[in-house]
Image (cartoon, rainbow, N blue to C red):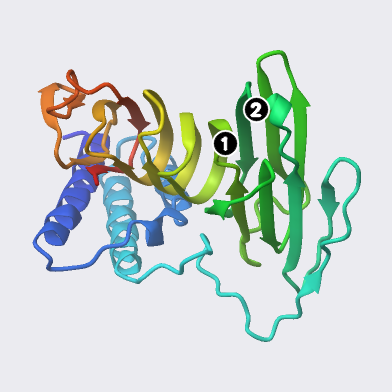
Amino acid sequence: MKLDRLMWGILLLFIGGVLLLENFNIIDFYWRSVWSFWPIFLIIAGVNILFNKNNSQTGSIISIAVLVVALSFLFYKGQQVPERGNWWGHQFKKDVDINLNDNDNNDDNDHDNDSDTAFNQLKLSEPFVEADNAKKTVLNISGGGISFNLDGETPELINADITKKHGNFSLKKVLTDSATVLTFKMDDKKGKWNFGDGGNDVNFKLNKAANWDVIMKLGAGEANFDFKDYKVRTFRFDGGAAALDITFGDLLPITDVVVKSGVADVKIKVPTNSGCRIKTKTGLSAKDFDGFIKLSDGVYETANYKASTKKIFINLDGGLSNFEVSRY
């Protein structure tokens, strides 16, 4: 048997075994606790390349041993309850000094206040303009190592309350003929890969009168958005190692949801009175679509899909992810 097939077999046995033990309530496994250790798989690939140039038996044994040790470590870490609000598992220190910089705003809403010892509180916002509300509002979000949360509504168009350890954040608005385009961005050129010193938290407040298109590009992090009371026409996510918990409402006749991920834990909730269709291209991903009927490979629908006047279309594309879609 070829080594690569054997290693894939061991990996699939591991994932299947964890899911089975979890389904029978033998263990509680938190996939979110292991996503931040994804570089382990790069190490495994590197060992495989180094020790198996000539397909030697000794090299194969070393590669398999490294894989088994790595999976054992992930199995142990996965049973530890993840820290809420910090993707990288570090707690905020209770005795940290908090520097308030709410008034350090410039004309472009750009902020740069890197501190090695404190978490800084920043606020960004854009006003709501009634004349622009006839257009759709596009919210572009990008960054890495960030925990995003939707924290209620605002009379302004958008508010962003940021608790940050590193990085520069900006919120900019551009008006086009058809849309109000908001771009929320984190730029951390000096320490974008240095996650050991803590993460960043962003709490959004959105205006309920706007028609939203939300587009996220997230290197690694998590997002918890309850859009139940918001008019979200489109939600698109493109990311690597991420945890998503997204709830959609039924205020619009059509909602499009597209999720493309590498290693992710994705939970999506849709209302029962909306018809929903799911299309998947998920590789080795786990799928749990409660209340859906499988029509063909990769295609699922709710029983009321054809009859419903309101529809939600979900496209899921993931490599090694956990996808859950449920109805409320």
Q: Nearer the viewer, residue 174 or 41?
A: 174
Q: Amino acid at mark 1?
A: Ala
- Observer able to see residue 148: no
Q: Nearer the viewer, residue 243 or 13?
A: 243
Sequence-wise, which precedes: disc 2 or disc 1? Answer: 2
Tally the marks: 2
Instruction: Report the residue marked by disc 1.
Output: 209
Q: Is 235 left or right of 195, judged from the image as shown?
A: left
The image shows residue 1 at horizontal and vertical percentages of 16, 35
The image shows residue 113 at horizontal and vertical percentages of 84, 60
Say which residue appears at 45% left-offset and 69% top-offset: 83
> Helix or strand or loop: what does disc 2 sit on?
loop
The image shows residue 232 at horizontal and vertical percentages of 47, 33
Instruction: Report the residue marked by disc 2.
Output: 133
* Circle 2 residues within 10 Å: few <14, some 14–19, many ≥20: some
Q: Amino acid at mark 2?
A: Asn
- Observer able to see residue 290: yes
> Helix or strand or loop: what does disc 1 sit on?
loop
Residue at the bottom extreme?
Answer: 95
Examine the rendered structure and indicate whether residue 290 appears above or below residue 235: below
Task: State the image quarter where residue 165 is shown.
Answer: bottom right
Q: Nearer the viewer, residue 160 or 316?
A: 160
Examine the rendered structure and indicate whether residue 24 appears above or below residue 14: below
Say which residue appears at 55% left-offset and 36% top-offset: 216
Task: State the image quarter where residue 181 is shown.
Answer: top right
